[in-house]
Image: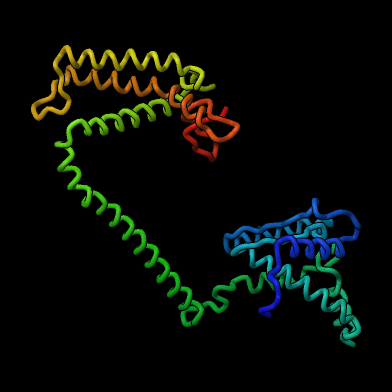
């Protein structure tokens, strides 16, 4: 065992292709024409759905064209049923001389010996058996049944574990501000580093504003595209210059310990947020210059169905 060389992907795949080619009725190159069937999870519901799919493919003769079967969870239940019956039918067909002597049993044996994936295969008895034992998690129901109490105990255990995990996660999240309290106490005394908070606030508000504007306008917003970077940069310079000028004229100090004059602070805040908004096209342009791929972003902040990027590639 130790002296054997490990199998590589290429070797295993080539062996699989040989076996698939041998079982196909039509001899044709199969390496580029492989077909797979996958059943997802979902308990008995996914197994029932998978059985319906198999029953729909069977009369069309498509089951024999499937080369790979992939299953998970509930889909594995019906996948195991299909694989087991294919194996049993092949064994019965190979041992056709061992058929029962009774004519009725012999006829049933011969029907069950037909290729399970063939259109003429009789699935009725096997499906009836499958339905009778579909309650595989708790085969014996009843108040005094061990299966019932086992399922109840498993459900209570899993519920408690899930709830305990969620509660601990929430507790950790609520404890996060505690180690940051020292930073919050020192932050008012770090001087010009406090402008970092202002910049982050401006970026957040400008991003949300651009996002809302983009979603509420059909066909996009031309100003948010990278082609408008020059106009956006010029507008940002004007807004920031106006904010600085207004602050100097009114002798406004944003980090003073005294009361804040909101008549001055409000327009300055608006101008700063407008500056951040106008810089969005320039940000897209800058990112497109350093983008590693061949399809750089063209527009900022969009959302497609099932996909939420912060950059659009249209």
The answer to whether residue 25 is above or below residue 80 is above
Task: Specify the quadrant that holds the C terminus.
Answer: top right
The answer to whether residue 269 is above or below residue 35 is above
Residue found at x 82% / y 65%? 19
The answer to whether residue 174 is above or below residue 70 is above
Residue found at x 39% / y 63%? 162
Residue found at x 64% / y 66%? 76
Residue 126 lies in quadrant: bottom right
> Visible in this render: residue 215?
no
Say left or right for 135 vs 189: right
Q: Number of numbered discs present?
A: 0
Q: Residue furthest front?
A: 3
Task: Specify the quadrant that holds the N terminus.
Answer: bottom right
* Camera-nearest residue between 156 and 200: 200
Residue 137 lies in quadrant: bottom right
Position of residue 306 measured from the top left corner of the image (x, y, whole percent): 54, 40
Position of residue 256 measured from the top left corner of the image (x, y, whole percent): 12, 27
Say left or right for 182 vs 11: left
> Visible in this render: residue 68?
yes
Residue found at x 31% / y 33%? 200
Position of residue 159 measured from the top left corner of the image (x, y, whole percent): 40, 66
Position of residue 21 measured from the top left corner of the image (x, y, whole percent): 85, 61
Q: Residue furthest left?
A: 258
Say left or right for 279 vs 80: left
């Amino acid at each position: 065992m130790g002296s054997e060389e490990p199998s590589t992907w290429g070797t295993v795949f080539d062996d699989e292709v040989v076996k698939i080619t041998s079982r196909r009725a039509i001899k044709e190159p199969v390496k580029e024409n492989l077909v797979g069937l996958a059943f997802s999870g979902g308990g008995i519901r996914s197994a029932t759905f998978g059985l319906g799919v198999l029953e729909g493919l069977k009369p069309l003769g498509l089951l024999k064209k499937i080369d790979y079967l992939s299953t998970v969870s509930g889909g594995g239940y019906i996948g195991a049923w299909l694989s087991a019956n294919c194996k049993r039918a092949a064994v019965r067909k190979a041992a056709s001389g061992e058929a029962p002597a009774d004519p009725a049993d012999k006829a049933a044996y011969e029907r069950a010996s037909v290729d399970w994936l063939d259109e003429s295969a009789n699935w009725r008895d096997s499906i009836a058996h499958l339905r009778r034992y579909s309650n595989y998690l708790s085969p014996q129901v009843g108040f005094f049944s061990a299966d019932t109490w086992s399922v109840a105990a498993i459900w209570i255990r899993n519920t408690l574990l899930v709830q305990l995990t969620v509660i601990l996660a929430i507790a950790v999240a609520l404890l996060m501000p505690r180690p940051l309290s020292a930073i919050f106490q020192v932050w008012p005394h770090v001087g010009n580093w406090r402008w970092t908070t202002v910049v982050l606030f401006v970026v957040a508000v400008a991003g949300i504003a651009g996002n809302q504007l983009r979603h509420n306008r059909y066909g996009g917003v031309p100003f948010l595209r990278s082609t408008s970077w020059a106009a956006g940069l010029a507008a940002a310079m004007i807004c920031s210059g106006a904010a600085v000028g207004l602050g100097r004229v009114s002798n406004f100090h944003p980090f003073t310990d005294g009361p804040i004059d909101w008549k001055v602070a409000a327009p300055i805040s608006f101008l700063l947020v407008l500056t951040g908004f106008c810089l969005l096209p320039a940000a897209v342009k800058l990112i497109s210059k350093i983008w590693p791929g061949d399809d750089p972003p063209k527009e900022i902040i969009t959302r497609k169905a099932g996909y939420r990027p912060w950059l659009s590639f249209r």
